[in-house]
Image (cartoon, rainbow, N blue to C red):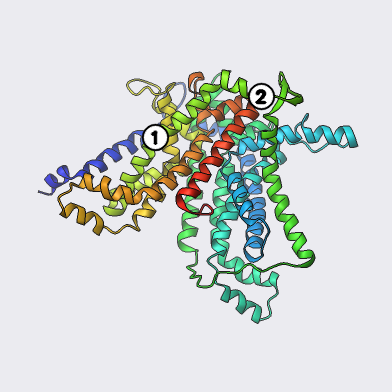
Amino acid sequence: MELKRFRLDLWAFVLIISLALVGLFIIYPLSSIFMGGFQDAQTGNFSLTNFERFFTRRFFYSTLFRSLAVSVTTTILAVILGATMAYLTTIYKVAGKKIIDIIVIISMISPPFIGAYSWILLAGRNGYLAQFFRNNFGIVLPSIYGFGGIVMVMTLSSFPLIYLFTRGALRKVDSSLSEAAESLGCNPIKKAATMIVPLIMPTVLAAALLVFTDAFTDFGTPMLLGEGYIVLPVLIFREFMSELGARPNFAASLSVIMIVITAALFMLQKYIISKKSFKMSSLRPIQAAKMTGPWNVIVHIFIYAVVALATIPQLFVMFNSFRATSGPMFTAGFSLDSYRRVFDALGSAIRNTYLFGLAAIVIIVFMSMFIAYLSVRRPSALTNLLDSLFMLPFVIPGAVIGISLIMAFNNRPLLLVGTPWILIAAFVIRRLPYTLRSSSAILHQISPSMEEAAISLGDTPLKTFFKVTAIMMMPGVLSGAILSWVTIINELNASVLLFTVPTRTMTVVIYQEVLRAGYGPAAAMSTILTVTTIISLALFFKLTGKADISL
């Protein structure tokens, strides 16, 4: 009897389809990469040769230490900048705070590799600032390439995450605690160190782990700025795509190492959030105080300087997109030639970005709504497992996702490699978690009685879902979908492995043009991508009625 009801139940059917999809596009590709990592390239037998090769040769294992050095340094600097800015903008009145928030959010959403490209234009060997100081003052600026340049670009793209997390935590601190500390004789520095920092530390640590993971898995920035400083994601790309003899099994073993590290970091982050966070009821949030005297000047200079460092490079790219070019070099005067070339010769990449992104978003929206309904309205061990499996790609590096899809779908009957569908699949897998979490969050706020009333009036469960539940979920679903969309159009790590010439996207074209010193078209394409991102964020704010992105 129970089996019959299971067969006839709509949501049981949806659960089966969802489990089949997660098995086909997540478990199967990841199992392929694990099997490839433990497989001898010559015999196909089980072997630890690939791992032995990595851990016994200095050239290979040093890339892991370099990745850790970049990630640790980036995380420390991002925490210092982001947490300090969040604290100052929360407890003090800062002129232009709303504009600062918007700029910070745009800096966070924009891909780091565009920041790397902009700094090449500014401070590269023939960059504007490099030439200015060399020609006018005889000063040679420090090289933007290598460890220092990678860390600087990653820090400027990562500190907004710390800023948003920390500011959200500070908003939950009740001002009565601050007043109590002051009544006991604490000065501002001692109050921050002994009362505020311990309260927000779990949130800051959780954000820091996200920054560390992003820095550890980033491919674009170290690829453009690294030169001889090779990190693990770049090594994986080179081993898998090398023109001198690709070694997919060795690249798979490197991917396994990255998965283990990022999964461990994700578990650590979940532990911090679930066990170490404080529940605070902010009946009286901290009120920003007005600053006077030298301190007012110092705080504003610091905040504006950090925001400028995060913004000026992108503005400089936009400026360069309108400069005249002669071959790879910019010349005097202004021109729309870069845009003409982009739309004439590279217009397919713009079209692909929007078409593939929209296709992925449609799939993401429907899947997120169904999976969220299963996990919230039909909680069980299976639905909880389903939700966790669809969230798994959130912590898996993009390059690893790309390699896993190539290894899984490179043969018939499921031959997706070389088609647009493999890119769309990668976008859905990587960016579904954003919309899934927002869909689940809003569904928790919708009473089941609304659905029960519709069913009692004769509607079928499917009709009830689309006529009642889906419509009420739409604000939360759309807010998550827009964030998924923004990250999809800025995706490089997986796309650079999966594209073919007919399926190139804007990020891939920008990356290729920078490598071949086509700075004019790269600047034009980057500007189009940045403007699309800004418009998408404006739509997000309009639909949600929010002034920022809550994390």
Where residue 438 appears, x then y in whole percent? Answer: 41, 50
- Mark identifier at residue 17: none
Question: Can the viewer see residue 69?
Answer: no
When the figure is inspected, residue 438 is found, relative to residue 33, above or below; the finding is: below
Q: Residue at x 87, y 37 (%)?
A: 139
Instruction: Name the one closer to the observer, 329 or 45.
Output: 329
Residue type beneath disc 1: Ser
Marks 1 and 2, the one that precedes in the sequence: 1
Relative to the observer, which residue lies in front, 156 or 109?
A: 109
Does residue 88 appear to the left or right of 400 in the view shown? right
Q: Which residue does the numbered mark 1 point to in the structure image?
A: 31
Q: Within the image, what quadrant is residue 359 found in? A: top left
- The answer to whether residue 313 is above or below residue 511 is below
Label 2, on which residue? 336
Image coords of residue 96 (percent x, y)? 66, 55
State which mark lies toward you, 1 or 2.
2
**Label 2, residues with CA under 10 Å away: few <14, some 14-19, many ≥20:** some
Residue 294 visible (yes or no): yes
Residue at 70 percent across and 42 percent down: it is: 312
Q: Amino acid at mark 2?
A: Leu
